[in-house]
Image: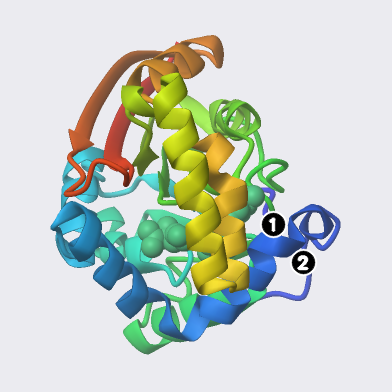
Amino acid sequence: MNAQNMHGSARNTQALSDSDLVIAAFTELAAEYEPTVDRELRMFWGVSYRDFLTRFLTMAAIAPGESVLDIATGAAALPSRTATAVGPQGRVYGLDITPAMLTQAAQRLAAEGWTERAPLVCGSALAMPLADASFDAVLCALGTHHMDVPTALAEMRRVVRPTGRIVLADVCANNFWRSPAGAVLLHALLIGYGLSLRSTRAQAEIEAFNNVRTPDEWQRLLIEQGFRNISLQTIPSRYPWYPSGILIHALPA
Ligand SMILES: C[S@@+](CC[C@H](N)C(=O)[O-])C[C@H]1O[C@@H](n2cnc3c(N)ncnc32)[C@H](O)[C@@H]1O
């Protein structure tokens, strides 16, 4: 495994410089990340963060001995809940671009005794310091909307084994947003959101909006980036102006 391990000394600092806003936003949020995301998922999708992760991991179906990569791992909720499933022969790597999130992740994994089984890597999903074809499962929950999605998918395609799968979950756009009226309404709502919060997190979420795709757009992008057997599930939003959720399972073509 060609990875720069967070528990060691090397860090991929070059890739960090492009994403200052994301890093600032998640540095600001790091200590409060999980209660915040739990509150937001309950408010907008009517599901707890815990139940969302359970649904995601049911789709991922991680097996003993597997090599798993969790992209945009945040505070390592997925590695924490996957370490038992991979067993002593398996590994679950957590990659994130924000050192403050990885500090939360490292503390949690150490407290749970998973430091060796769940190594952390600081780097960008858009240029991962990881070897080709090295993972049975590549996961990414609530992360792709902060990324250039075609580049992130191309990187996932590069590191997943030919027999592996990717499992993603994120916010997704609905078709109304793609209509002229929907686009105007959305623009107004985004300005209101930015003005009301004025935090780096709000700015990062506004910047991320162009990366939010409809299910059809996801399907097309996945095919373009070399995936097949694509299964999509949606989590309906409680409000028409807020993005729904999408869960995606796909195989390398
Ligand atoms: C909303 S959190 C998701 C955390 C976790 N996956 C979860 O399910 O709770 C988004 C994470 O994506 C990370 N992130 C954003 N852009 C990234 C990139 N280009 N490469 C790696 N991580 C990135 C942020 O640092 C943040 O920790």
Query: What residue type is disc 1 on?
Result: Gly
In this rendering, does residue 73 appear at all? no
Indicate whether 36 appears above or below 177.
below
Horizontal and vertical percent position of residue 33: 42, 76
225, 68: nearer the viewer: 225
Horizontal and vertical percent position of residue 61: 21, 41
Query: What residue type is disc 2 on?
Result: Arg
236, 191: nearer the viewer: 191
Mark 2 or 1, nearer chain start: 2
As drawn, is 73 to the left or to the right of 238?
right
As drawn, is 116 to the left or to the right of 20?
left
Whether pointer 2 and pointer 1 mark residues with C-beta atoms closer than 8 Å, the reply is yes
Q: Secondary structure at mark 2?
A: loop
Q: Within 8 Å: ligand 1 and the Cβ of disc 2?
A: no
Q: Residues within 10 Å of mark 1 (few under 14, many from 20)?
A: many
Indicate whether 105 appears above or below 209.
below
Q: How is the image coloured?
A: rainbow
Q: Within 8 Å: ligand 1 and the Cβ of disc 1?
A: yes
Q: Secondary structure at mark 1?
A: loop
**Residue 185 is drawn in which quadrant?**
top left
Quadrant of the snapshot with the C terminus = top left
- On residue 123, the disc is 1
Which residue does the numbered mark 2 point to in the structure image?
A: 11
The residue positioned 44% from the left and 72% from the top of the image is 75
Q: Tell me how far mark 2 sits from mark 1, CA to CA.
A: 7 Å
In this rendering, does residue 212 appear at all? yes
The residue positioned 24% from the left and 64% from the top of the image is 84
